[in-house]
Image: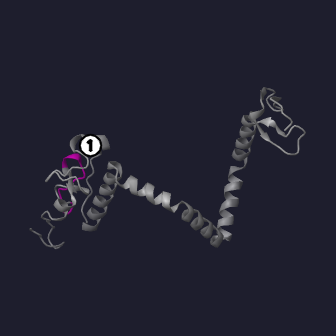
């Protein structure tokens, strides 16, 4: 680049600062003839026109070279693994993640018992208004907190609702009495 401070875009005709142009070693001034916004629009239009063909070509390559695709994906994950694991761990502690896990578990266990699924929708904010996050509702402990269904999931009347959920510490949740429907287990009473 020979020290130009401004340049005219060959596409839109606007006079712009030299920083608004990509560098290009084959031009006299060392800058691409079109400004960055015009190049971006051009690339976007090209992608939209050729999207289907590009996706088909990518799918074909994946089918023909599964080992390369798998190796590339594995290498990418290995590079990002520490960050991914840290983000997962941090997210898994949030109320939204815990409620999602609780709902998935409720549905899975109800299906395994052959019982209907009763879910009453509510927001994370509504749940947090009813429960102080991080505090056991039985003993007040602030250790490892879990979401508990007050009416056990295995009972026919159990619902996944605000009224049937509470926060318990690991000890209170693990050692509370369990009730099972006939033939599904035994009543544990501590």
Tell me, what colour scheme is on the image?
Answer: one colour
**Residue 189 lies in what quarter of the image?**
bottom left
Which image quarter is the N terminus in? top right
Which image quarter is the C terminus in? bottom left
**Res 123 visible:** no
**Does 36 sit left or right of 189 as displayed?**
right
Give above or below for 92 relative to 183. above
- Magenta stretch, residue numbers: 153-163
**Res 73 visible:** yes
Depth check: 51 or 30 in front? 30
**Does 76 sit left or right of 175 as displayed?**
right
* Residue 31, percent from left and from top: 82, 39
- The residue positioned 87% from the left and 37% from the top of the image is 29
Q: Residue furthest left?
A: 189
* Residue 62, percent from left and from top: 65, 66
**Residue 26 lies in what quarter of the image?**
top right
- Is residue 155 highlighted in magenta? yes
* Residue 65, percent from left and from top: 67, 70
- The residue positioned 60% from the left and 69% from the top of the image is 70
Q: Residue furthest right?
A: 28
Residue on which disc 1 sits: 128
Give above or below for 118 relative to 123. below
Q: Which residue lies furthest to the front in this view?
A: 3
- The residue positioned 26% from the left and 43% from the top of the image is 128
- Is residue 35 highlighted in magenta? no
Sort mark 1 into few (<14), some (14-19) or many (20+) by Cα contacts within 10 Å.
few
Depth check: 114 or 80 in front? 80
Question: Which type of secondary structure does the marked residue at label 1 adopt?
Answer: helix
Which secondary structure type mostly characterizes the magenta part of the structure?
A: loop
């Amino acid at each position: 680049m020979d020290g130009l401070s401004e340049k005219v875009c060959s596409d839109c005709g606007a006079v712009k600062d030299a920083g608004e142009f990509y560098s290009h070693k084959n031009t006299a001034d060392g800058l691409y003839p079109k400004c960055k916004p015009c190049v971006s629009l051009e690339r976007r239009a090209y992608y939209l026109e050729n999207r289907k063909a590009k996706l088909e070509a990518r799918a074909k390559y994946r089918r023909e070279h599964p080992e390369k695709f798998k190796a590339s994906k594995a290498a990418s994950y290995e590079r990002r693994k520490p960050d991914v694991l840290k983000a997962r761990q941090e997210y898994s502690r949030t109320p939204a993640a815990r409620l999602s896990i609780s709902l998935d578990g409720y549905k899975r266990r109800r299906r395994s018992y052959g019982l209907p699924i009763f879910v009453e929708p509510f927001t994370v904010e509504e749940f947090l208004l009813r429960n102080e996050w991080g505090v056991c509702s039985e003993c007040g402990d602030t250790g490892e907190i879990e979401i508990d269904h007050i009416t056990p999931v295995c009972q026919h009347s159990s619902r996944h609702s605000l009224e049937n959920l509470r926060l318990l510490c690991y000890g209170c949740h693990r050692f509370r009495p369990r009730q099972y429907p006939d033939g599904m287990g035994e009543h544990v009473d501590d």
